[in-house]
Amino acid sequence: MKIIFAGTPDFAATALAAILSAGHEVVAVLTQPDRPAGRGLQLQESPVKRLAKANHIPVLQPQSLHLQNKDEKLSEEAKQTLAAIDRMDFEVIVVVAYGLILPAAFLDMAKRSGRRGCFNIHASLLPRWRGAAPIQRAIEAGDTKTGVAIMEMEPGLDTGPVLIDEALLITNDDTAQTLHDRLAQLGGELIVKALKLIADTTDLILHPQDLNRVTYAHKILKSEAKLDWSSAAELIDRKVRALNPAPGASTELEGELVKVWLTRVPKTSKDAVDTRPGTILGEGEQGVLVQCGDRAIELLEVQNAGGKKITGRQWFLGRPKEKTQCFS
């Protein structure tokens, strides 16, 4: 099929690579403008842009495609971009983690003159976890499974009917990064299946979402990073995994920030139910044990401010024992 692809991060680049490997023709790519990154704050191209350039695919990078003001008028840049896309010879639009709001005019254009529509790769089993952070929220909530849904796009936030989906189990060791990588791979496989279905089927069977099962995956905020040691150990473990790799869970010790990257809830531990939550209990099997609201948790990988990531055991053995032994 002839496809216009809209996406920005690694998750989207994985899908684009799968589409190209399946032999489809990507006539153009939309991706977010280059952003400053790194210590030098030099402009960095998105993973999708780099892949598009490597495959000699034209790239469009509008600052916005949405409304310019309350009068509901498109900006001049948005008008020019939409007009350029409309002149292209394409059959379907695929969107995944683009990061810009798409106006109704964009979605309408995808169905004009025999075109098949605009389809989104979403990293959850819709209608669960609509929104910006489905991977992190699924881990944080303790879900045992998630998946990928290929959805026909509507103006609402992830409200469109689902064409196909596939489930994926969440393990007790999954971080947002490891789950992201597995879902990205599944997303690439599933969009190739979906495109074959779109190409081969005149009347697609689309499944409306069950409105009684809707949940929202709100954007992860930096203010969520601080750990509350009075919480249950299992909840803290989920939070640490959900916030890895960004923004990373954090705590404080004597006013100094400590990042917590990996934890585990041991089957047996030095529980001290009358001990203040956050108290460092001592060395564990692989790290350092810390009291939570109900029991102890083991910190497996930590990082002092300005330092490198080290094991919890290294951190504990390198810390003077006369120092304060309670996180806040």
Image: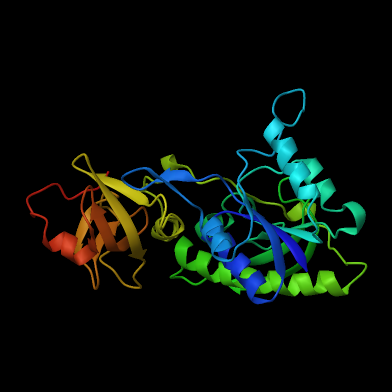
Instruction: Work out whether residue 143 can be spotted.
Output: no
Q: Is residue 189 visible?
A: yes
Of 56 and 267, nearer the camera is 56
**Does residue 310 appear to the left or right of 139 in the view shown?**
left
Q: Compare residues 327 and 9 and report the one nearer the observer.
A: 9
Front residue (pair 208, 316): 208
Residue beneath the point at 85% across and 60% down: 116
Give residue 301's position: percent from left, percent from top: 28, 63
Instruction: Kindly identify the residue that appears in the image at 63 percent across and 60 percent down.
Output: 57
On screen, residue 220 versus residue 41, left or right, reads right
Looking at the picture, how far across and down is residue 42, in whole percent? 38, 44
Q: In the depicted view, which residue is nearer to us: 266 or 107? A: 107
Compared with 256, 321 (above or below) is below
Q: Position of residue 228 (x, y in %)?
A: 37, 46
Q: Is residue 226 left or right of residue 31?
A: left
How many marks do you count on the picture?
0
Q: Is residue 304 above or below residue 101?
A: below
Query: Which image quarter: residue 5?
Result: bottom right
